[in-house]
Image: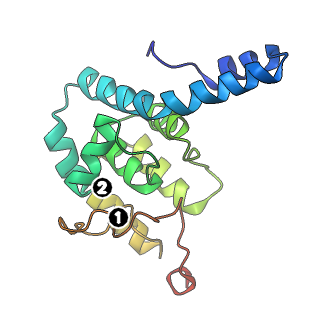
């Protein structure tokens, strides 16, 4: 996709920055472009795969008002689990999902992390059912990507979601 630079390209730009002013400019550009780049990436991927936005959001099980914010650029700090659910519902490959996570600043899926390994396993096998992945996570005593079906009247209920495993000590037992 033509609209964003890779991490290597960004590292090269930083390596060539000689003055503090160049660093400040770089950081300002990075901050202002992140939200639109994610929404552009998601929308372009959605279009390339011939997906319908409303159907992707329904299959993701993410609250619709929250999910639409990913696609219109209004979600400033996307929740990693919800973004993964949207990527899965959009039928993104592992590299496409990793890129979306990287653009969003959420941290990529890490194969050594059991939670992430389950997600990677399912994406690699083209299991595009968030509900089935949630069932598998439950079987391994892990939190779901998204609660069974988020309450429509409270999209921010789980916004502190986290990155992978649970922050609840009882959930790890």
Q: Residue 18 vs residue 96: left or right?
A: right
**Of residues 25 and 112, which is closer to you in this image?**
25
Quadrant location, the C terminus: bottom right
Mark 1 sits on what residue? 134
Mark 2 sits on what residue? 130
Compared to 78, does 131 lie above or below?
A: below
Check contact, mark 1 vs mark 2: CB within 8 A: yes
Compared to 118, does 34 lie above or below?
A: above
Image point 22% across, 66% down: which residue? 149
**Of residues 135 and 63, which is closer to you in this image?**
63
Image point 44% across, 45% down: which residue? 76
Task: Give the residue at the far front of this rendering.
Answer: 21
Q: Residue 121 vs residue 87: left or right?
A: right
Q: Residue 7 vs residue 22: left or right?
A: left
Within-10-Å neighbours for mark 2: few <14, some 14–19, many 20+ = many
Image point 50% across, 40% down: which residue? 104
Compared to 80, does 30 lie above or below?
A: above
The answer to whether residue 173 is visible is yes
Image point 48% across, 57% down: which residue? 118
Q: Which colour scheme is used?
A: rainbow
Compared to 147, does 31 lie above or below?
A: above
Query: Where does the image place residue 131, in percent across and percent down from the top left?
Result: 27, 61
Q: Which element is circle 1 on?
A: helix
Query: Where does the image place residue 93, in percent across and percent down from the top left?
Result: 41, 34
């Amino acid at each position: 996709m033509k609209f964003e630079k890779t991490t290597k390209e960004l590292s090269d730009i930083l390596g060539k920055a000689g003055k503090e002013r160049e660093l400040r400019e770089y950081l300002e550009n990075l901050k202002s472009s992140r939200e639109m780049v994610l929404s552009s990436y998601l929308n372009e991927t959605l279009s390339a795969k011939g997906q319908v936005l409303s159907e992707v959001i329904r299959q993701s099980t993410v609250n619709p008002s929250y999910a639409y914010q990913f696609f219109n650029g209004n979600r400033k700090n996307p929740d990693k689990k919800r973004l993964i659910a949207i990527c899965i519902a959009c039928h993104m490959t592992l590299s496409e999902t990793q890129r979306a996570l990287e653009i969003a600043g959420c941290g990529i899926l890490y194969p050594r992390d059991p939670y992430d390994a389950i997600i990677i396993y399912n994406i690699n096998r083209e299991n595009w059912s968030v509900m089935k992945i949630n069932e598998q996570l439950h079987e391994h005593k892990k939190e779901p990507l998204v609660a069974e079906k988020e309450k429509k009247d409270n999209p921010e209920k789980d916004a502190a979601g986290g990155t992978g495993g649970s922050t609840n000590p009882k959930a790890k037992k």
